[in-house]
Amino acid sequence: GAGVSQTPSNKVTEKGKYVELRCDPISGHTALYWYRQSLGQGPEFLIYFQGTGAADDSGLPNDRFFAVRPEGSVSTLKIQRTERGDSAVYLCASSLTGIGPGELFFGEGSRLTVL
Amino acid sequence: QKEVEQNSGPLSVPEGAIASLNCTYSDRGSQSFFWYRQYSGKSPELIMSIYSNGDKEDGRFTAQLNKASQYVSLLIRDSQPSDSATYLCAPLPMEYGNKLVFGAGTILRVKS
């Protein structure tokens, strides 16, 4: 596609449920990032993929969060046993190579609300 | 101390004026600096990057970098109502590899 695509755009779930958020990066971009953004805050880094492997997952807040990118393109962020504090906009971004990542292209985000 | 500090604003300027947005950062090893614009309800988009001390101009935008003071700024000349958005400062800290660390952003409001 022309840009980074994220689905769903909105997800409302109940506390304790499992959710998956999907990201389809710009074709040919090897680097893929997940950030999350709470109201009034800047994006907070979660995880970075270079190809299929997670090059840096230091931003994942705990073991309830997991992300995969099995074929080096589409990525899925998985959140188990959701908590109200997980409510945020989850942003995916891709970059051609990941080096000098200022050229991050963001998707429109998935807004997660945990009731 | 936060890694990236920005005045949250809102910064209000009249149409046609110069808007000055400031950012300080804690990682002295940062070499690359980026400004992203984020409209309400939208995702961030890159508007400026700067790597060397001094000024870099691109149209109505000028980025200024002073590594010794760990300070980076963005000037917007001839501000337009369409510039109203949140501006995010994002240095690339050397110790953090390939990930950007974003500030909380400054809200800019340009009044016509």
Image (cartoon, coloured by chain):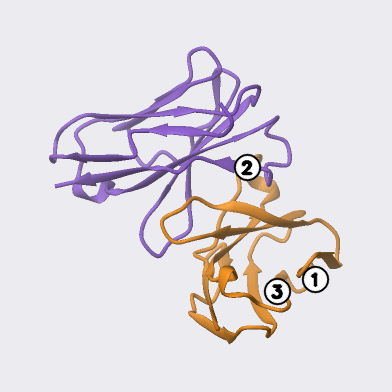
Helix or strand or loop: what does disc 3 sit on?
Answer: strand
Question: Alpha-carbon neighbours of circle 2 within 10 Å: few (<14), some, or many (≥20)?
Answer: many
| Residue found at the very far front of the displayed protein | B112
Compared with A112, B108 (above or below) is below
Q: Are dots 1 and 2 in contact, CB under 8 Å?
A: no
Badge 3 and badge 1 in a common chain: yes
Q: Hey, which quadrant is residue A18 in on the image? A: top left
- Nearest the viewer among B66 and B62 is B62
Q: Position of residue B73 (x, y in %)?
A: 70, 72
Foreground of the two, A33 or B25:
A33
Q: Nearer the viewer, residue A103 or B1?
A: A103
Q: Which residue is mark 1?
A: B68
**Hey, which quadrant is residue B30 in on the image?**
bottom right
Colour-to-chain, purple: A
Q: Chain of mark 2?
A: A
Cβ–Cβ below 8 Å for labels 3 and 2?
no
Q: According to the image, label 2 marks what residue?
A: A104
Chain letter belonging to callout 3: B
Mark 1 and mark 2: span between their CA atoms?
27 Å
Residue B62 shows in this picture: no
The amino acid on which the numbered mark 3 sits, given as a three-letter code, is Ile
Query: Residue extending furthest top?
Result: A71
Q: Amino acid at mark 1?
A: Ala
Position of residue B79 measured from the top left corner of the image (x, y, whole percent): 66, 77
Give residue B47's quadrant in the image: bottom right
